[in-house]
């Protein structure tokens, strides 16, 4: 991955009749406004791939076994996970994806700010120095996760929990935003309905279909499975200090989440005009620090459906029919499979649509991806992506929070350890 062209991302989140991820209620080209809720999104691969909440096994187990409520974050692994500023960044998007607008989760940080390194925004958001931080729902992909009896439900609950985790995982993966490029994205899929055991398609109105015509692909899998976390990327809290992993070139092609996947639309051409493998790798592997950074959020596994006979270079783009069944109103509904031959089938993919194919790269990144350097490609025309060898320089992600030295001496505290079980 070339450091000049590693710039891509997703920005914010809004809920209409379907789901629209948007940076603002209007776009730069004065298109039809996106109505209703709009919340800021700035989720980088660095944060989603290296935080104490979703890349720590004990935290993932706690998220799986507990409801997404204030009480669950009052003490224990989930409270301690949010001592990490990167985890709190992920928490905003996790709650926004999972819960509905009237639902929220609060977290009360330690009185000593050196233990959790608040941002200026977080300080400003607190009414009093001892006030909790509040994370609000928006999309409502899984409002049942806030049920206090979440871990005590019967077999029907287990099915709901699986669909919830898959939908929220796909939402977080789709919101990957390497360089803070603010771009509108329409995300569509099938979600649980009000009647237990049934689902419904998120409705998309005519204006949204018109304004977001370019199908980018589908995300699916589960990043909340503790046993599927690549332990080479695990972040721990030891003696009050955040320990992020030291990575080498050996990790360049490794997946952070072993159950996270993306497929590209079968209508995209391969070869000299459009290479979905390169596009998707930069979509889910690019970091804010650029360069040949090790680790990817998801694995590109091929075309969501069968390649059309007219699509050139299909053999280079991976296997076909990653997702079964014809798309419903252009939306992949699954089941989808990760690696070829996998028995596990993912029932809840999220399909992403863009205004135009270069949106996720931003104007500068799009210009760099155009072979002749002439600027963004035309709407509905695939970008020209030059093949580049991986950058051999490994840069440790910048922006780590200050070391946590614990509480002042006069306020003695017992260190918390979230290291999880040792590898055999």
Image (tube, helix red, strand yellow):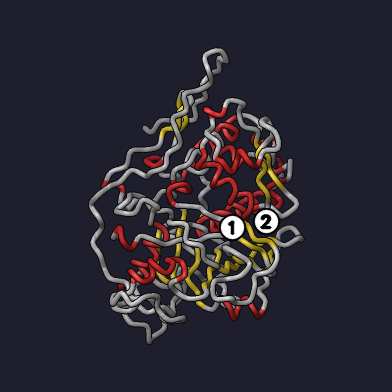
First along the sequence among labels 2 and 1: 2
Res 167 label: 1
The residue indicated by pointer 2 is 138
Pointers 2 and 1 in contact (C-beta within 8 Å): no
Crowding around mark 1 (Cα neighbors within 10 Å: few <14, some 14 to 19, many 20+) is many
Q: Closer to the camera, 261 or 339?
A: 261
Q: In the rendered image, is residue 336 in sight?
A: yes
**Vertical position of residue 45 compared to residue 412: above or below:** below
Q: Which quadrant holds the C terminus? A: top left
Q: Which secondary structure, mark 1?
A: helix
The crowding category of the residue bearing disc 2, from other C-alpha atoms within 10 Å (few below 14, some 14 to 19, many at least 20), is many
Task: Examine the image and state in which quarter residue 321 appears.
Answer: bottom left
Whether residue 312 sits left or right of residue 97 in the image: it is left
Relative vertical location of residue 70 with respect to residue 195 in this rendering, above or below:
above
Element under disc 2: loop
Q: Quadrant of the N terminus?
A: bottom left
- Between 295 and 240, the residue placed more toward the observer is 240
Total marks placed:
2
């Amino acid at each position: 991955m070339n450091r000049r062209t590693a710039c891509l991302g997703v920005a914010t989140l809004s809920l209409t009749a379907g789901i629209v991820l948007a940076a603002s209620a209007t776009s730069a080209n004065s298109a039809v406004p996106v109505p209703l809720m709009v919340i800021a999104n700035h989720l980088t691969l660095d944060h989603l791939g290296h935080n104490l909440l979703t890349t720590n096994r004990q935290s993932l187990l706690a998220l799986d076994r507990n409801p997404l409520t204030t009480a669950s974050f009052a003490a224990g692994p989930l409270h301690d996970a949010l001592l990490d500023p990167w985890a709190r960044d992920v928490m905003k998007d996790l709650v926004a994806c999972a819960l509905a607008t009237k639902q929220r989760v609060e977290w009360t940080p330690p009185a000593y700010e050196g233990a959790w390194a608040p941002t200026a925004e977080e300080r400003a958001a607190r009414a009093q120095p001892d006030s909790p931080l509040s994370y609000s729902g928006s999309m409502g992909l899984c409002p049942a996760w806030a049920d206090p009896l979440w871990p005590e439900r019967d077999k029907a609950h287990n099915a709901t929990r699986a669909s919830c985790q898959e939908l929220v995982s796909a939402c977080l993966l789709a919101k990957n935003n390497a360089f803070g490029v603010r771009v509108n994205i329409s995300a569509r899929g099938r979600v649980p309905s009000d009647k237990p055991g049934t689902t419904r398609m998120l409705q998309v109105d005519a204006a949204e279909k018109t304004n977001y015509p370019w199908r980018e692909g589908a995300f699916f899998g589960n990043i909340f499975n503790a046993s599927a976390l690549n332990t080479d990327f695990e972040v721990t809290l030891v003696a009050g200090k955040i320990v992020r992993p030291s990575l080498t070139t050996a990790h360049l092609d490794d997946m952070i989440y072993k159950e996270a996947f993306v497929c590209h639309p079968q209508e995209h051409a391969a070869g000299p005009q459009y290479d979905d493998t390169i596009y998707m790798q930069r979509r889910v592997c690019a970091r804010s620090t650029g360069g040949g950074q090790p680790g990817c959020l998801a694995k590109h596994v091929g075309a969501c459906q069968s390649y059309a006979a007219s699509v050139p270079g299909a053999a280079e783009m991976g296997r076909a029919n990653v997702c079964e069944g014809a798309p419903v109103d252009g939306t992949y509904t699954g089941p989808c499979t990760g690696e070829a031959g996998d028995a596990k089938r993912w029932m809840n993919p999220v399909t992403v649509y863009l205004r135009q194919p270069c949106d996720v790269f931003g104007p500068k990144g799009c210009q760099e991806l155009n072979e002749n350097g002439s600027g963004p490609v035309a709407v509905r025309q695939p970008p020209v992506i030059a093949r580049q060898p991986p950058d051999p320089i490994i840069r440790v992600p910048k922006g780590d929070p200050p070391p946590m030295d614990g509480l002042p001496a006069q306020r003695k505290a017992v260190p918390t350890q979230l290291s999880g079980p040792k590898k055999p």
